[in-house]
Amino acid sequence: MPQLPRTSSEIRSSFIKFFESKEHLFVRSSPVVPQDDPTLMFINAGMNQFKACFLGDNPNGYKRVANSQKCIRVSGKHNDLDEVGRDTYHHTFFEMLGNWSFGDYYKKEAIAWAWELLTEVWKLPKERLFVSVYKDDDEAWQIWKDVSKLPDNRIMRFGEKSNFWEMGDTGPCGPCSEIHYDKGDLATQEATFADPVKGVNGANARYIEIWNNVFMQFERIKNGELLPLKNKNVDTGMGFERVCAILQNKESNYDTDVFAPIISQIAELSGTPYSQDASGMPHRVIADHLRSLSFAIADGALPSNDGRGYVLRRILRRASRYARVLNQKEPFIHRLVPTLVQSMGEAFPEIRERADFVAEVIRSEEERFIRTLDAGLERFEKIATEGNKVIPGAYVFLLYDTYGFPPDLTRILAEEKGLQIDEAGFEAEMEKQKERARAAQKQGLSAIGSEGWTIFAEGSTEFLGYEKSTVAVKVLRYKEDKGSLSIVLDRTPFYAEMGGQVGEKGMLKNPDVEFKIFDTLKVNDIWIHRAKLISGEINEKNMSREFTASVNEHERAATRKNHSATHLLQAALRKVVGEHVNQQGSRVAPENLRFDFTAFQALTPEQIKEAENLVNAKIQECLRVASDSMPIEKAKEIGAMALFGEKYGSVVRVVSMENFSKEFCGGLHVKNTGEIGVFRILSESSISAGIRRIEALTAFNAIESFREEANIVSLLKERFRSKDILERITQFSENLKANEKLITDLRAKIAENQSADLFKKTLLIKNIPIWVSQMSIEPNDFSALLEVAQKIMPAQGIAVFANVQSDSGSIAVIVHPELVKKNIKAGDIVKKLAELAGGKGGGRPNLAQAGTKSPEKIGEALAAVEKIMGEF
C-alpha cells in the first residue's frame, strides 16, 4: 500500500502523477507576470495560460493538461491584502493545482477522478466532504450521487454567485461544482452545514472549499446572452496550501511545511517567538509577502510607482512595517530569501536561479522604505497636532498611499494620542483610487471570442517574416475599433510585438481597398494587424478578396541591426561587468534600442567605453548570425541564454553569433554583424533597484548623432573663439559662480538693512508686539528678507510682511518660537489674511505664506491684522 503524501512536495508531486496516470500532460507554471494579457496585473488562476484554448485557439494541441500554477491575488475583486495574516487562509501568493480538458473528457470523468484522488489516494474521510453544484445542473448532481454515494443533502445546490464561474463580464463561462471539507467537530456538523453563514459556502473557516471543477461550455457576450462553445471544456483549481493543511492535520495554512520554515527563520532572526494568535500576525504577514515579492521579482516584475510595480511596493512596505513591529529597524525581509529558495527551489527553479537578484531588489526597497517610514511617522505627528479629534480620511489615505501606512497602523497611532480616524472617508478615497486604476487599465486587444468580429474563417496566423517581406494573404476576421481596424490574416510577413521588438508597420492592399498597418500585435497564435484605411470601402466583399501584405523594408532593416546589437551588448556586458548581468527587458525599434539589465551599481565610464568598444570590435569581425530551432533542453546545454520571466515551449529558436553570443530569441536579425555598421551608447542610468538601462544607436542613426555633436563642438569653438573650448567653458563657469555669490551676499546685506527698518514701528496687541509692513521688491529679495527677519526679530512677537507685484502679491507671517508654544501658529493667521486678499496659503507654525492674484486687496488684509490678532 503506497504511503500517503505528507510533505508539501509530496502532495504536489502526488497530484501531478495522479493526472499523468490519467494521460494528462504536465505543463509547467507560467510566470506570475502575464506575458500576453495586458488586462491582467498578475496571473491569478491556473487557467490564465490556457485562456485561449477554451475558445478554440489551441496551437499546442492540448487535450488533457495538469499543472501547479504560481498565483498572486492582490488587485481587483481579489484584493484582500489587508486581511493577510489576520486569519489562517488568506494569502497574496498561492499555488493552484489544476487539471484541464480541452474538448476531451467532461463532467463524468472530472468528477470521478476528483473523488478518486481525494478519497482513495489521499484517504480523506468521506464524512467530512461536501459537494456543491449549480442550481440547474442536474447532470452534475446525478454524477456526484452515483460516484460518491453521498447523502442527497450533502450534494448541495447554489445559484450564480457561488456555482456559476465567469472569466469576466464577457468570455468563457459555465456551471461549476465545488468540493468542501469540514474541519470542525463532526458532532455539530448536522446542525451547521446548511447554515448560510456558518455552513458550506458561508463566510467561515470551518467548511473550506478545496477544489473547484468548472464545466466551461458557454461564451457570454456583451448583451448577456450565452453562446455554446464549440467544445465543452473542464477547468479545475485546487488550493494547494489549503489541501496541505488538511493532509498535514494543521488548523492553519501557516502551520504547514509550506510556511513553517520561513516563520521559524523569522522568529530566529528577530528574536521574537511565533504565536498562532494575533501576536503572530507579523510573522504570518512577512512569510506570505516574502513569497509574493520573491516570485514576482524572479518573473520580471519590479517595485515602482505604477501598475503592478506599485502593488509590489505596497506589499513590500506592508511586510517591512510588520518587520518594524518585530523591532527590526534595518533591512530584514531580504535575509529570508535563502529559506524560501530551500523549500521551493526544486519545484520552481527560477527562484533559485535569481535568488541573489531577488534578495538585492528587496534589500534596496527595504532601505528606501525605512527612510519613508520615519518620514511617515513625522508626517503623522504633524497631522495629529492640527487639533482634529478625528483624523480626516484624506490624511489616512495620504499616509497609506505615500508612506505605506495601512489604516490599522494609523488607527493605533491615533488611539495612542486619544484620537480617532475617519474610516468612511478613507474608504471613499480608496474607491476614488480604484476608479482611477480602472480608468487607466489597459484594454487588451483580443482575437478570442466572436463578438464584434466579422469572421470569414477560423484559424491561426502563419508567420513568414523570417524569409519574406511581401506575402499574398487572406483575411480571417476583422473588427472596427475607434476609427481603426483590427485585422487577422491567415499568414503574414509582419513581426508582432514581442521579446522587446516592436510590431512592424507597412501596407495591406488589394485592387478595392488599401490599409496602412501602423502596429502588429500577437495574442497566442493569432497576429492582430492594427490598420488605418487609406482608400476604398470596408465591406465584406472587399475584405474577402486576396490582399498583398508588405512590410516597411527600410524600418525592418534598421530594426534587425538594433536587435542584433542588443545581443552583442548583453554578451559584452557579461564579459566587462560580470556574469551576474542578465537582460531584464528591452525595446528594439527602427530608430534606437534600449536594454535593461541587472547590475547592483552604476557602470563606470571605463566599463561603458570597454563594452561599447567590444561590441564594435565584434561588428568589425563580421560574425555570422545563425538562427536554429531546437529542443529547449539542447538549447540550455549549448549555453543559450533565456530571458527571465518568459515562458518557452518545448522547442525554441536560438540566435547565435558564432561563439560570442547565444540567446533564445524569436526576433529578426542581420545575417552577419558587419551589417550593423557602428554601435554607440548614448546613456547608462538606473530605472529601479538593481536594474540599469542602456540606450544606444546603430548604423546611420549613430553616425548622425556623431555628426550632430561635432557640429555643436564646432559652433562652441566659434562662439568662444578658442580651440580649447573646455578650458574656456570652465573659466566661464567659475566666473558665473563668483558673480552669483557676490549677488547673494549683496542681497543678504540689503535684506538685513531692510529687515532692521521693518521692526521700528510696533503694534502691541494683548501684550504681543506685532510688526506690519508692505513693500514692492523682487520675489527672491523678499525670500531673503524673510530669512533674515526670522533671525533678527527683536522680541517674542509676530511679523506680517506683504510684497506687492503688478499682477500678484504675497503675504508672510513670522511667529516667534515661544509664541508657537502657546498655540499661536503662522499658518492659522496667514489663512485668515489670505481669505481677505483673495488667495490661499499655509506653511509651518513659525513661518507661513499666502499668494494672491489680486494685489489690490493686500492693503485691506493688512488693515485687518489688528482685528484678526484680537481673536487669538
Image: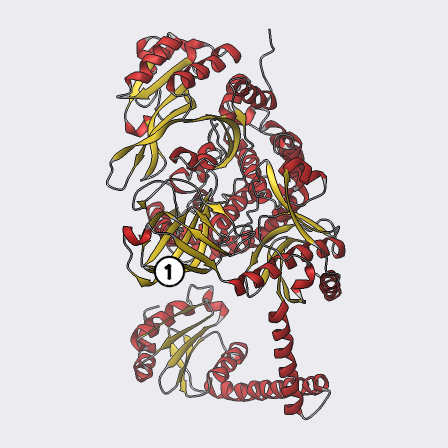
In the rendered image, residue 682, in percent from the top left (x then y), is placed at 63, 68
Q: Give amino acid for label 1.
A: Phe
The foreground one among 114 and 124 is 114
Q: Residue at 46% of width from left, 60% of height from top?
A: 505
Q: Residue at 47% of width from left, 12% of height from top?
A: 116
The foreground one among 482 and 743 is 482
In the rendered image, residue 265, in percent from the top left (x then y), is placed at 65, 33
Q: Can you say whether 555 is above or below 24 in the image?
A: below
Q: How is the image coloured?
A: secondary structure
The foreground one among 431 and 111 is 111
According to the image, label 1 marks what residue? 515
In the rendered image, residue 351, in percent from the top left (x then y), is placed at 63, 38
Q: Can you say whether 346 is above or below 404 in the image?
A: above
Report the label total.
Answer: 1
Query: In the rendered image, which quarter contains the N terminus?
Result: top right
Query: In the rendered image, which quarter contains the C terminus?
Result: bottom left
Can residue 566 be seen in the rendering of this structure?
A: yes
Which class describes the residues within 10 Å of circle 1: few (<14), some (14-19), or many (20+)?
Answer: many
In the rendered image, residue 816, in percent from the top left (x then y), is placed at 48, 72
Query: Residue 224 appears in which quarter of the rendering?
Result: top left
Please give left or right for residue 196 compared with residue 240 in the image: left
Can residue 327 be seen in the rendering of this structure?
A: no
Disc 1 is placed on an element classified as strand
Q: Can you say whether 245 is above or below 745 in the image?
A: above
